[in-house]
Amino acid sequence: MTAKKHIVVLGAGVIGLSTAVHLLETKRDVYDVTIIADALPSDDRKSGLAHYASLWAGAQHVSFASLEDTLQQQLDRATFKRMWEMSDPSTATSSLFMRLKQTEYYRSVPSDVAQGKAALDFMPDFRYLKEEELADKGAKAGLEFTTVTIDVPTYLAYLLARALALGGRLLRARVMHISQVYSGAFTPTRPVDAVIVCTGLGARSLGGVEDLTVFPIRGQTVLIKAPWVDWGVTLSGSGKHKPGEELLEPPVYVIPRASGEVIIGGAMEPDDYFPLPRAGTTKSILERALKLAPQLVQTPNPTLSDLEALILEEGCGFRPGRRDGIRLEAGKWEDKVVVYNYGHAGQGYQSSWGSAEEAVRLLDAAFA
Ligand SMILES: Cc1cc2nc3c(=O)[nH]c(=O)nc-3n(C[C@H](O)[C@H](O)[C@H](O)COP(=O)(O)OP(=O)(O)OC[C@H]3O[C@@H](n4cnc5c(N)ncnc54)[C@H](O)[C@@H]3O)c2cc1C
């Protein structure tokens, strides 16, 4: 019998944890897995963790992969398949998700939707909205389908618990350079054969990676308690969202969770490192959300103060953007294997399982 290889997954966001779980679920006989990260799911969100994107996501599965971006489509579809299975009412994981009717309104119509070939047409109950259904929303087109939302705090805790239950190990540490990991500095009794870099925005400053094409896309949200909300809605931002360019008008979205809490947003501010909620943005989010979805509040003719009364907390997180999109590839650090899995911007949850599967395939291929 050949000895198992020791794999370090660097990062404990949704990408690192999903990668660790997928490795352990499918290749436990071949690989031992240690997760190393300096921020963990149980950390206090109020202690200045804007850089730990996974804590701040909505999160919903609404793919915005273009028709041309076949890799992103593959990642999103594979993830949806898995999340749909995990959210089946007969499973123990179903309470991590909410299945719901999602409505997407577009201020700027994506080309696939404009051509009547929506990349989202694989979603259950998919249909195009009729023109009369767009009235008063300020939208030029729209879609409706069924999807899942993810109860983020509980889901991250579940992923970590699952990785540990499958035999994974966990170490909290700040890594300055990937050479520290290979040197055995963190795991002195167990030499490291490969590192999977799932550090999100941290890839910008991590020695040995230092990917300066990685940048923050600042998001801001408001968490409210509104258990009567069992539908999701988005009004897309206007203008082209090119890397490094702010949208003319930010998106507005409502994402309910199984817990009865609802995330409303949003903001999309590239290269903005301000780590705390801005009062003006919170007010604008509330105004825009109430206009799009007055049913957020149960009283007739709801006002801003009615919505404010439901607030639990304000949030701010940095999506890990990357100029050329997600980095999913294998390489070498000196003579050791390294797999990169970062740069998921605003789509880390909805492409998490697909990215994990691809990272494990790259790892296997690198050792073959
Ligand atoms: C407001 C908001 C709304 C969002 N909504 C959605 C949504 O609806 N759907 C969706 O799919 N996505 C959404 N996202 C995007 C999603 O949150 C991210 O794509 C995803 O969380 C990225 O995960 P990650 O694991 O790559 O990075 P992170 O969650 O940032 O985790 C990075 C990990 O790496 C560790 N790390 C980094 N550097 C080092 C180092 N040097 N040493 C040790 N550890 C290190 C950190 O400690 C952390 O554990 C949203 C994001 C925001 C901010």
Image: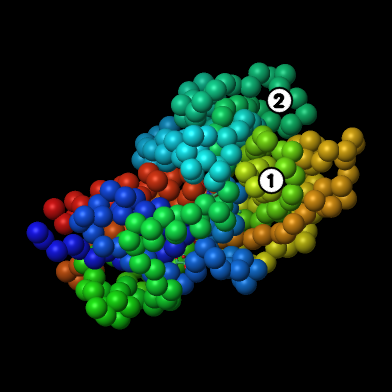
Colouring:
rainbow
Does residue 320 appear left or right of residue 229 in this picture? left
Q: In this view of the protein, can residue 366 be seen by the observer? A: yes
Q: Nearest the camera: 63 or 41?
A: 41
In the depicted structure, whether residue 63 falls above or below residue 346:
above
Which residue matches tag 1? 260
Of all residues, the one furthest to the left in this rendering is: 1
Percent x, y of residue 89: 52, 34
Residue sitting at x 66%, y 18% = 130
Residue sitting at x 56%, y 68% = 43
Residue sitting at x 78%, y 49% = 286
Q: In this view of the protein, can residue 112 be seen by the observer? A: no
Report whether the residue tagged 2 is closer than 8 Å to ligand 1: no
User: Of label 2 and label 1, which has the lower sequence position?
Assistant: 2
Residue sitting at x 41%, y 64% = 11
Percent x, y of residue 208: 32, 72
Residue type marked 1: Gly
Which residue matches tag 2? 134
**Dot 1: within a 10 Å radius of its alpha carbon, few (fewer than 14), some, or many (20 or more) residues?**
some
Report whether the residue tagged 1 is closer than 8 Å to ligand 1: no
Q: Is mark 2 on a helix, strand or loop?
A: loop
Residue type marked 2: Leu
Quadrant of the rendered structure where residue 20 is? Answer: bottom left
Percent x, y of residue 200: 45, 61
Q: Nearest the camera: 275 or 69?
A: 275
**Dot 2: within a 10 Å radius of its alpha carbon, few (fewer than 14), some, or many (20 or more) residues?**
some
In the depicted structure, whether residue 275 falls above or below residue 119:
below
Percent x, y of residue 138: 73, 32
In the depicted structure, whether residue 58 falls above or below residue 56:
above
